[in-house]
Image: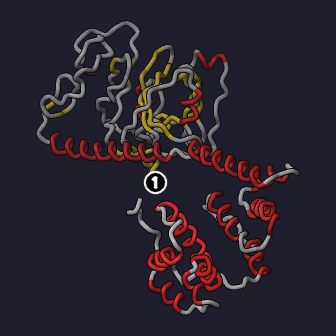
């Protein structure tokens, strides 16, 4: 124990009174821990001055004692340092400082309470010190709900106030943990960044490879050897593996679900108009479940009501649109929820304004007792659902399309049971 590290020296700048009280407490603990508290006065004074530092030594040399022997009295030396470091206090000012102490934003209750107790020591409260600290806790606490809880107890003690404040602070910390899953947010952000970078690399690789790639008999597209997207996939026509329904060589099944051909998923699709204004929706009736109803508006827009995935959906037919749109509102109303693919598809209206896309999905559309698998781009709530000109023609809706992009390509492989409808 003789090698126990002594406390830091006495700081005679700043709040000297507080510095002295802290140093004195640590020094007396040091004497007790090292067994020096029972040593003669002169030795304890020597240890005190050595630990306190050179500035304390200079102050000691200015002390005047009534008797020469008092200079070797440890108690008398401590009294001199008390008088030097803690001059006569202004009680009114000390209490003003105490009453002005409020909990700061971000400050823990323990820090607030400890500082109040330290300030109360120089206020001369005597036996009323605990009640004064309790009152200042109630007055200076930031949390109004905790303050109201303490005010309901007319016999509140300092110990009870501390217990209530500690419990409230702990409950708030736990609630914040549930309400702010920052770790999950960071994790999801990292996952999104990884997926985005991977998609960019894949796009670059596809651009470089497609130039030298040959037509594939299994998927119908172009790719490098051993990179066929149909590998491992099951044909929706014959239930065989490793080829798409478009390339299937077997005969058609009875009552097939027809796949409506779409343009390449990597293109930018242009939509004629996607505003929800002036759209008159057709009310659902029993007749709608068996028949397709449509009508022509004065502005060359057709409104058609079709059964889609078990729900009746009103769509506007836009003969100039190159893609089909389905509102997220309609998706949520469907009995059979479709699988949504996060495809990188850019949608623009004919003014060049980009349209937000939530992904793509394939939906089962029924027209005159025939079922078709149609690829839709999903748009946010508030936008209308729409059928493009090419899809409208392939669904045999018998409409005059004034602007149709005739290019057809392999639809997405996430199709379900399908066969191809040829123009």
Q: Quadrant of residue 74?
A: bottom right
- Number of numbered tags placed on the structure image: 1
Q: How is the image coloured?
A: secondary structure
Q: Is residue 353 above or below residue 195?
A: below
**Is 230 rendered above or below residue 239?**
below
**Residue at 72 percent of width and 74 percent of height:** 122
Instruction: Say if 155 sits above or below 233 in the image.
Output: below
- Residue 263 lies left or right of residue 374; in this view the side is left
Residue drawn where x is 59% and y is 44% of the image? 179
- In the image, 290: left or right of 113? left
The residue lying at 86 percent from left, 50 percent from top is 155
Q: Secondary structure at mark 1?
A: loop
Residue at the spot 85% in from the left edge and 49% down from the top edge: 153
* Quadrant the C terminus occupies: top left
Mark 1 crowd level (few <14, some 14–19, many ≥20, 10 Å Cα): few
Q: Position of residue 183 (x, y in %)?
A: 46, 45
Residue 359 % position (x, y): 43, 37
Q: Which quadrant would residue 410 be assigned to in this image?
A: top left
Residue 165, given in percent of the width and then of the height, sits at 70, 52
Residue 43 picture location, percent across and down? 48, 75
Q: Nearer the viewer, residue 70 or 310?
A: 70
Foreground pick, 343 / 27: 27
Q: Quadrant of the N terminus?
A: bottom left
- Label 1 sits on residue: 353
Q: Nearer the viewer, residue 128 or 173?
A: 128
């Amino acid at each position: 124990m003789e090698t126990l590290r002594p406390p830091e020296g006495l700081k005679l700048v700043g709040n000297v009174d507080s510095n002295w009280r802290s140093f004195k407490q640590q020094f007396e603990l040091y004497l007790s821990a090292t067994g020096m508290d029972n040593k003669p006065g002169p030795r304890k004074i020597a240890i005190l001055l050595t630990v306190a530092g050179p500035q304390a030594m200079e102050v000691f040399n200015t002390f005047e004692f009534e008797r020469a022997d008092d200079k070797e009295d440890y108690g008398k030396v401590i009294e001199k340092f008390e008088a030097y470091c803690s001059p006569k206090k202004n009680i009114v000012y000390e209490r003003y400082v105490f009453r002005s102490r409020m909990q700061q934003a971000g400050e823990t209750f323990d820090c607030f309470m400890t500082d109040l107790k330290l300030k109360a020591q120089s206020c001369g409260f005597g036996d009323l010190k605990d009640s004064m600290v309790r009152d200042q806790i109630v007055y200076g606490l930031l949390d109004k709900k905790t303050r109201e809880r303490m005010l309901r107890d007319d016999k509140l003690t300092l110990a009870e106030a501390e217990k209530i404040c500690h419990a409230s602070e702990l409950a708030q910390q736990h609630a914040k943990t549930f309400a702010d899953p920052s770790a999950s947010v960071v994790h999801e952000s990292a996952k999104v960044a990884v997926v985005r970078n991977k998609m960019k690399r894949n796009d670059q690789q596809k651009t470089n490879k497609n130039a030298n790639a040959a037509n594939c008999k299994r998927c119908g597209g172009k790719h490098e050897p051993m990179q066929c997207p149909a590998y491992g996939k099951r044909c929706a026509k014959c239930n065989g593996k490793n080829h798409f329904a478009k390339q299937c060589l077997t005969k058609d099944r009875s009552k097939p679900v027809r796949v409506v051909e779409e343009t390449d998923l990597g293109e930018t699709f242009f939509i004629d108009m996607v505003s929800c204004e002036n759209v008159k929706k057709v009310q659902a009736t029993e007749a709608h479940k068996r028949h397709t109803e449509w009508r022509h508006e004065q502005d060359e827009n057709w409104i058609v009501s079709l059964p889609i995935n078990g729900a009746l959906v009103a769509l506007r037919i836009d003969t100039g649109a190159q893609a089909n749109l389905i509102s997220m509102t309609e998706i949520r109303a469907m009995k059979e929820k479709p699988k949504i693919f996060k495809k990188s598809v850019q949608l623009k209206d004919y003014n060049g304004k980009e349209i937000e896309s939530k992904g793509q999905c394939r939906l089962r559309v029924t027209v005159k007792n025939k079922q078709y698998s149609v690829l839709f781009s999903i748009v946010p709530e508030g936008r209308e659902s729409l059928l493009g000109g090419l899809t409208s023609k392939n669904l045999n809706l018998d409409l005059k399309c004034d602007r149709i992009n005739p290019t057809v390509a392999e639809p997405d492989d996430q199709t379900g049971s399908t066969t191809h409808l040829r123009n």
